[in-house]
Image: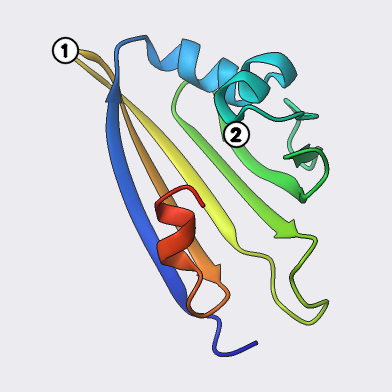
């Protein structure tokens, strides 16, 4: 693969509390419902998770309840020499509920646009 410097940021408002969003991200059933695929989540720092029925594997690096999630992840199609991309989810209480900002970086060159659009 090429240079591994792709990145993106996406922000959206969700009409529930930051606690509800944080808890859902780290819950097997709720995260699976969001992604429409099987998930094995972890609520522990250094805990491992899988998503999309094992297609994605990762580790929780930092967890700040109701505020921030930092994870690394690796897709089964990546080369073994590719560094693991990072994802940071920050949650801010706003009048409409929660503003979620998702940042991803160290994405294999040319792949960020597809991840940003959810592909």
Instruction: Identify the residue at horizontal 51%, vertical 52% (top origin).
Output: 119
Q: As drawn, is 105 to the left or to the right of 31?
A: left
Q: Secondary structure at mark 1?
A: loop
Give above or below for 113 relative to 54: below
| Residue highlighted by disc 1 | 95
How far apart are labels 2 and 1 at the CA level? 24 Å
Q: Secondary structure at mark 2?
A: strand
Could you tell me residue 23's position as x and y percent?
A: 58, 16
On the rendered image, what quadrant is the N terminus found in?
bottom right
For the residue carrying disc 1, how many other residues have a C-alpha within 10 Å: few (<14), some (14-19), or many (20+)? few
Say which of 119 and 32 sits in front.
Answer: 119
Residue 45, percent across and down?
A: 73, 37
* Viewer-nearest residue: 90 or 57: 57
Measured as percent of width and height from the top left, residue 39 is found at: 75, 30
Q: Residue at x 80, y 29 (%)?
A: 40
Whether residues under marks 2 and 1 lie with C-beta atoms below 8 angstroms apart, the answer is no
Q: Is residue 29 above or below residue 7?
A: above
Vertical relation: 100 (above or below) 62? above
Q: Residue furthest bottom?
A: 2
Q: Which residue is mark 2?
A: 63
Residue, far left = 95
Residue drawn at point x = 46 percent, y = 40 percent: 89
- The residue that appears at 40% across and 37% down in the rendered structure is 90
Residue 15 position by quadrant: top left
Q: Nearer the viewer, residue 116 or 91?
A: 116
Nearer mark to the viewer, of 2 and 1: 1
| The image quarter in which residue 52 lies | top right
Q: Earlier in the sequence, mark 2 or mark 1?
A: 2
Q: Position of residue 83 (x, y in %)?
A: 69, 74
Count the numbered circles shown.
2
Mark 2 neighbour density, 10 Å: few (under 14) some (14–19) many (20 or more): some
């Amino acid at each position: 693969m090429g240079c591994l410097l792709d990145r993106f940021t996406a922000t959206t408002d969700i009409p529930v509390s930051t606690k509800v969003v944080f808890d859902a991200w780290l819950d097997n059933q709720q995260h699976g419902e969001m992604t429409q695929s099987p998930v094995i989540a972890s609520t522990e720092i250094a805990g491992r998770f899988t998503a999309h029925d094992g297609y994605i594997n990762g580790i929780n690096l930092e967890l700040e309840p109701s505020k921030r999630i930092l994870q690394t992840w690796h897709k089964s199609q990546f080369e073994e020499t590719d560094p693991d991309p990072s994802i940071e989810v920050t949650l801010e209480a706003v009048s409409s509920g929660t503003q979620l900002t998702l940042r991803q970086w160290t994405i294999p060159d040319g792949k960020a646009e597809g991840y940003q659009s959810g592909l």
